[in-house]
Amino acid sequence: MIRKHFGTDGIRGRVGQEPITAEFVLKLGWAAGKVLAPQGGGKVLIGKDTRISGYMFESALQAGLSAAGVNIRLLGPMPTPAIAYLTRTLRAQAGIVISASHNPYYDNGIKFFSGQGTKLPDDVEREIEEMLDQPMRTVDSSVLGKVERVVDAAGRYIEFCKSTVPNGTNFKGMTIVVDCAHGATYHVAPNVFKELGANVVEIGVEPDGLNINSECGSTHPQALQAAVLEHGADLGVALDGDGDRVLMVDHKGELVDGDELMFIIVMARLNEGCLGGGVVGTIMTNLGLEHALIEKNIRFERAPVGDRYVMERLLKEGWLIGGETSGHVMCLDRTTTGDGIIAALQVLAAVQKSGCSVHELKAGMTKFPQYMVNVTIREPVNVDGSPELASAVRDAEKDLGHDGRVLLRASGTEPVFRVMVEGSDAALVKKLANNLAHIVKKMQGAPAIPDRAVTVMDPSRITAR
C-alpha cells in the first residue's frame, strides 16, 4: 500500500490546506486512537511546538482521541524528543507531536511515537491510513476519553537531559549562547545548561506563535554566530523549532554541522571505549566524516535521508551513534530518538573532558566541499526520463572522479528537489551543482536557490583529498 499522507517525518504541510486542516486532524486523532489503543482506555500524550496553529490541532486531536475512547495527557509546548521520553516513562500507548519542525509558522504537522519512545513503524502508519478511510464512529458516552494536563513535564525532561552526562559534570566557567528558535525548547534548553553550571546567553526565547524558526535557530544560524562573537562565548547551540535538531558555533563563530558533531561524539566514545560498533549517516553525510571514521577503523553506513531511516539502520546493526548533516544526532546509549539538547550535552562533555575547544575537536575531520541547490517542484522529477539530465549527471561524475559524487533527490518534507554535488575542488563542485540545478529548473519552470542550512563553501576549511 502506498501511503497517502505520511512522509519521512509524519504528516506535514501548509495550515488550512489538505491534509493540514482541523477536520482531517480530528479524523486522524480518531484513527490513531483506534489503531494505537484498539481496546479503548489507555492514554496518549499530546505535545506541540509554539506555532499558533498548535492550539487548533491540539483541540482537534483531543476530540478525535476522545471519540475513540482514548484518554489524553496534554504536555503543552515541549520538544519533540521530550515527548518521546515522556511517552516511554509515563507508560503511554503513544505520543503525538504537533510540529512542523524547522518549517515556518504557516506550516504544521503531526508525528507519532510508540509506547517505547520510537517513531512508528511503516506498517503502523499504514494501519492508521487505512483507518482514515473508515467512517468515524464515537464510542458510548460512558467510555469517552478524558483529558488531563501533565503539569511537571518540563521539569521531568530537564532532569533527564542532565542525567545523560556523567555525575559531577559542571560547565562552570563556560559561556554558552543558546538559540531556541522561538520554539519548543525556549523554556527547557536554557535551564538545562544553567543547572549544569554554564553561564547562558539566551536568544530565540520569546515565541509569539508566528516567529518560530524565523531568522533564528538551526536553519538560520547567523544570529547565533554574531552573538557568540559579541559575547566572547565559548560556543553556541542552535536548536530548531521542535528541538530534535542541533547545530553549534565554535568560539571563532564558525558553524559546526551535524557531521562534525557526530565526529566529536564518536571520538569521545572511542576514547572512552564505549562506542558500541559503527556509525550511521545518510546519503547526504559529508565524505569527510566517512574518510575520518575509516582512518580510525570505524565502520560507516549510509541510510536514506530521514532520521527514521538512520534509526532503522542503527537498530538493525545494533549500533549507538548516527545522524544527519542537518543536525539530527542520535545517541542511543542516552535516549531513544534524535535529541538536540542531549547531543549538545555530549559535545560539551567531550569539550570538558578533553580540555580542547569545539574548534579544536572538529579539526580531526576535514570536510569535502559540498554544494546543494533546491529547486521548487510542482511534479516529480524523473532523472532517467530526461536524457539531458541523465547525461549531465554522468558527465559530472566523470569530472569529479573517485573523490566526489552527485546526489539528486526529492525532499520528504518540502516541495523541492535537491541537487547536491560533493568533491575535492570547491569551484568545480559549485559549477556542476548549478548546472544540474539549471537543467532541473528548466524541466519545472521554477526557481533554484542555494540551501544555506547545509551548504559548505568555506575554502579556508577545505583540503583537497
Image (tube, rainbow, N blue to C red):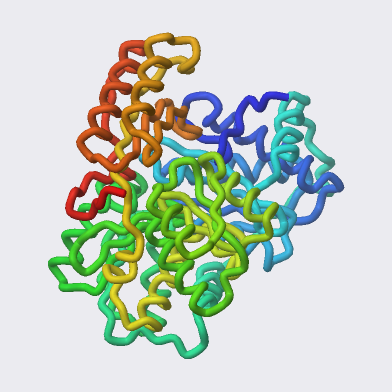
Locate residue 459 relative to residue 218 in the image: left or right. Answer: left
Can residue 75 be seen?
no
Can residue 277 be seen?
yes
Residue 236 is situated, as x and y percent measured from the top left of the image, at: 28, 66
- Please report the residue visible at 30 percent of the width from the left and 29 percent of the height from the top: 433
Instruction: Please state which of residues 105 and 122 is positioned toward the viewer in this rendering.
Output: 122
Instruction: Please state which of residues 137 and 340 is positioned toward the viewer in this rendering.
Output: 340
Quick one: which residue is furthest to the right in this view? 39
Quick one: which residue is furthest to the bottom in this view? 168
Residue 334 is situated, as x and y percent measured from the top left of the image, at: 58, 70
The answer to whether 293 is drawn above or below residue 39 in the figure is below
Quadrant of the rendered structure where residue 84 is?
Answer: bottom right
- Please report the residue visible at 67 percent of the width from the left and 32 percent of the height from the top: 27
Locate residue 46 relative to residue 345 in the image: left or right. Answer: right
Q: How many marks?
A: 0
Instruction: Please state which of residues 354 and 137 is positioned toward the viewer in this rendering.
Output: 354
Looking at the rendering, in which quadrant would you find the N terminus? Answer: top right
Residue 403 is situated, as x and y percent measured from the top left of the image, at: 37, 41
Quick one: which residue is furthest to the left in this view? 230
- Please report the residue visible at 25 percent of the width from the left and 40 percent of the height from the top: 425
Locate residue 132 relative to residue 239 in the image: left or right. Answer: right
Residue 452 is situated, as x and y percent measured from the top left of the image, at: 27, 42
Instruction: Please state which of residues 115 and 291 is positioned toward the viewer in this rendering.
Output: 291
Locate residue 418 relative to residue 462 in the image: left or right. Answer: right
- Please report the residue visible at 54 percent of the width from the left and 70 percent of the height from the top: 157
The answer to whether 428 is drawn above or below residue 232 in the figure is above
